Image (cartoon, coloured by chain):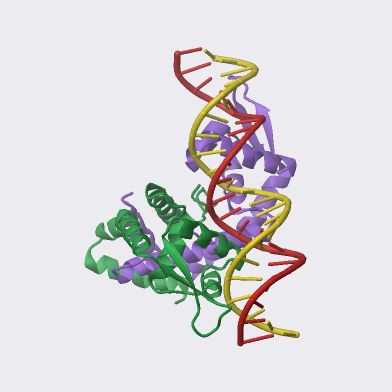
Chain colours: A purple, B green, C red, D yellow
Amino acid sequence: MAVPSGPVAASTEAERAMFDFVDAYDRAYETAAVRHGLTAAQACVLGRLADPRGMRELADELGCDASNVTQIIARLETRDLVRRRTGPHDRRSRQIVRTPAGSTLYADFEESFAFARSAISQLSPAEQDQLATLLRKALGR
Amino acid sequence: MAVPSGPVAASTEAERAMFDFVDAYDRAYETAAVRHGLTAAQACVLGRLADPRGMRELADELGCDASNVTQIIARLETRDLVRRRTGPHDRRSRQIVRTPAGSTLYADFEESFAFARSAISQLSPAEQDQLATLLRKALGR
DNA sequence: TATTGTTATACTCTATAACTATA
DNA sequence: TATAGTTATAGAGTATAACAATA
């Protein structure tokens, strides 16, 4: 299920709008992934592999345990969407590389994940700038 | 992991801001849930039980299979956070009720899930209105 | 000794299929 | 027959602990 979904007791209209937006975003992401035979987590990992990365790096970026990444990568590798190669400098490390098939599949997924694109398209260019500015300010970055 | 996280190839700054915002939101939700001994899915379900609901209704709202809800509710019931009672009119149905312990725990969770509140607090009242309006417009509702 | 990554294990989320009870 | 919900099962995500190989 789309995880943060649900009527958290949002006290302001802005909070409610955030909840609804995140809910819709997450559901659309999940749906797009499934449509391509991926889980959300697999799509998420594939998306980070535009450039090769080590397992540790991936785990840190994703904020999860390394053993978790090992399993996800193993499943992607079975389907020839990624490959593992031993790091050139440190022979303990592995570089995870997206295969051409993985890159193609991810590009298709991204194309199909139209949520953000279509959300943006509802706004004028000036409104798009405003939204970006407000979200950054709300995030504190 | 926070599911939609990751550098989807966002072509515009507004898209990137959306990605970052949703990512931060999801991570904060998960973290707050774990802090209270809940999974994100459990917190999500508990949050929908401000008023009693049937299993079918819950499954439809969450967009997942009913058998899934059965399991989540079973785990919450083991911990006395919800109870099941047979519906008054249709004896096939169950009304899921949050116990006082469940309501207290959820209130604590919500209090601890400060992401949306603190994001909002970065904005002036006028900016909060703008953000809500833009998010609604982007969502098409 | 510390770090990278894996394996073993256990729990949870999730869906599908088959089932019971009720309508 | 149709619907509400459960059970059985299987695959996937997740973390912890123990481990091997390398630094």
How far across and how far down the image is residue A134, in percent?
33, 60
Give the quadrant of residue B63. Answer: bottom right
Instruction: Look at the image and tell me whether residue B131 can be seen.
Output: no
Q: Which residue is drawn at 29% across and 61% down?
A: B120
Q: How many labels does the image show?
A: 0
Q: Residue at x 67, y 32 (%)?
A: A84
Instruction: Look at the image and tell me whether residue A48 can be seen.
Output: yes
Q: Which of A115 and A10 is in front in this view?
A: A10
Residue B128 falls left or right of residue B82: left
How far across and how far down the image is residue B75, in percent?
50, 56
The image quadrant where one finds the C terminus of chain B is bottom left
How far across and how far down the image is residue A63, in percent?
47, 41
How far across and how far down the image is residue A71, in percent?
63, 39
Q: Which residue is drawn at 28% across and 56% down?
A: B118
Q: Nearer the viewer, residue A50 or A7?
A: A7
Q: Which residue is drawn at 43% across and 70% down?
A: B97
Q: Nearer the viewer, residue A22 or B105?
A: B105
Q: Nearer the viewer, residue A68 or A45?
A: A68
Give the quadrant of residue B127. Answer: bottom left
